[in-house]
Image (cartoon, rainbow, N blue to C red):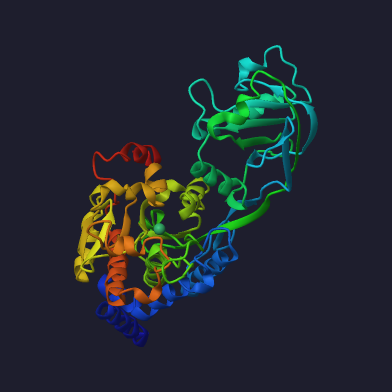
Amino acid sequence: MQKTLFFIAFLFCGFATLAQSDVQMVEETVSRSNIEGHIYFLADDLLKGRQTGTPELKIAATYLATQLRSYGVKPDPTTGSYFQAMPMQKNFPPATMELTVNGQKMENAVAMSQGNVDFSGTMVYMGFGLEADYQDVDVKGKVVIVKAGNEEGGGAQQAFGLIGDKTALAQKNGAIGVIEFIDTNDQIWGFIDHQFNEPRVGLASSEDEEDSIPFLWVKDTGGTIAAGLWQKNPEGSFTMAKKAAEKLDSYNVVGWVEGSDPKLKEEFIIYSGHYDHVGIGTPDATGDTIYNGARDNAVGVTTVLSMAENLAKYPTKRSALFILFTGEEMGLLGSRYYVENPILPLNKMVYCFNSDNAGYNDTSLATIIGLPRTTAADHIKNACKQFGLTAVDDPAPEQGLFDRSDNVNFARVGIPAPTFSLGFTAFNGDVTKYYHRPGDEADNIDYEYMEKFFKSYVLAGRLIGNDPVTPTWTAGDKYEEASKELYGN
Ligand SMILES: [Zn+2]
């Protein structure tokens, strides 16, 4: 008995002397070799620039899930998986498409909406093809020809916004296809042609495209083709055979660690960053075509992995949720999808500490987009100071960076959400030298600086996660209202 008591006393005693400070815990798990391992793998040419929708992005996702698993981070409690599938699809141009009007074959056309049609006969001119144009005209079984846009204008952008309405109207009235002539220049047409006449990956369509009718845009610079058609009903033929979209999934990678405090563990800090990049593209001067995305955003991913490894070993009082987003470069898709489909209730998420990076041009700094906008600013500043860095706010507000990364999707629903970035004093020099360029590679990064940067992030996360006071938006912030709504206070 006594022996046991003594043993317990010894244990407690030992525990007290071995108790580590947050700084020591950070020093213990964040190392240069770990950091290099993550960045070199994620930025390898093998992954072909980690474009959303490619098999190489799934390799990256598997790497991330494997890391989380090896740390002992828990998967999504509802599915038991580290992957959150985001439904996407690969769209193709139609299998066949041909238009002839008054004996003239139209060479420059794109299907804005696909459908199966095989028509030959008299087409019906319908003005703009808006509601009023359909009164007293029988278009059943016919292909209709319309002017682009409406009374206010017929530019590509204006016209694009009306395609849905015009298609629905034509279909409602029994037409089997719509042809619209677009008066636009070669540059804009080049962009449209590239967008719609080549395979492209996007979010899975929620609309039922099964029985939609085709909507065709025909390039008509100067309006010369159409001029001869207005007010008459031309003869022609129009055929199109749809090519079905290919369904595919892209993945957010998720995991979580339970907090150590019985009460505070009900609150979560989100640690996030996107792991996709822009893939393969225009070659640089050396002929390199792979946009490796080492800074953008293998670095951000490494902040999250560093945090996960640390917290799995030494949890903070608050719980932690780690999210690595897909689809950021395609328009913040992964984070938007996550916010619409959270794996844990959003109102338990009290902070989102995101990391996204373009590059750095000052290795004495960490630049935090939105630093003064949350009450955790002092923790972030102190953490940086501990490792010899100075935390500064966004120096380039004209770039609108706060609204250009995944943090904004969390901010909009009310969650305080700054973005932790590599140090830059202006969006120029070495930032723009590497931003979205093939040269953004693992071997031109300063790893001595990286070590300070990742340690600062992990310590900041620990200080926020252990603070008895819950972080909030700074009073008067534009997202304060959303925050009140989310947390109900
Ligand atoms: Zn990025």
* Front one among 345 and 228: 228
Q: Residue at x 63, y 25 (%)?
A: 146
* Front one among 43 and 5: 43
Q: Residue at x 31, y 76 (%)?
A: 447
What x and y, as percent, mark residue 160? 54, 34
Among the 4 quarters of the image, the one containing residue 465: bottom left
The quadrant of the picture showing ligand 1 is bottom left
Among the 4 quarters of the image, the one containing residue 272: bottom left
Q: Residue at x 53, y 63 (%)?
A: 75
Q: Is residue 420 above or below residue 38?
A: above
Q: Residue at x 59, y 58 (%)?
A: 79
Give the position of the C terminus as an image quadrant.
top left
What x and y, as percent, mark residue 260? 37, 64
Q: Is residue 55 left or right of residue 36?
A: right
Q: Determine if residue 416 is in view.
A: no
* Front one among 275 and 213: 213
Q: Is residue 93 above or below residue 148?
A: below
Give the position of the N terminus as an image quadrant.
bottom left
Q: Is residue 122 left or right of residue 450?
A: right
What x and y, as percent, mark residue 401? 33, 50
* Front one among 172 and 310: 172
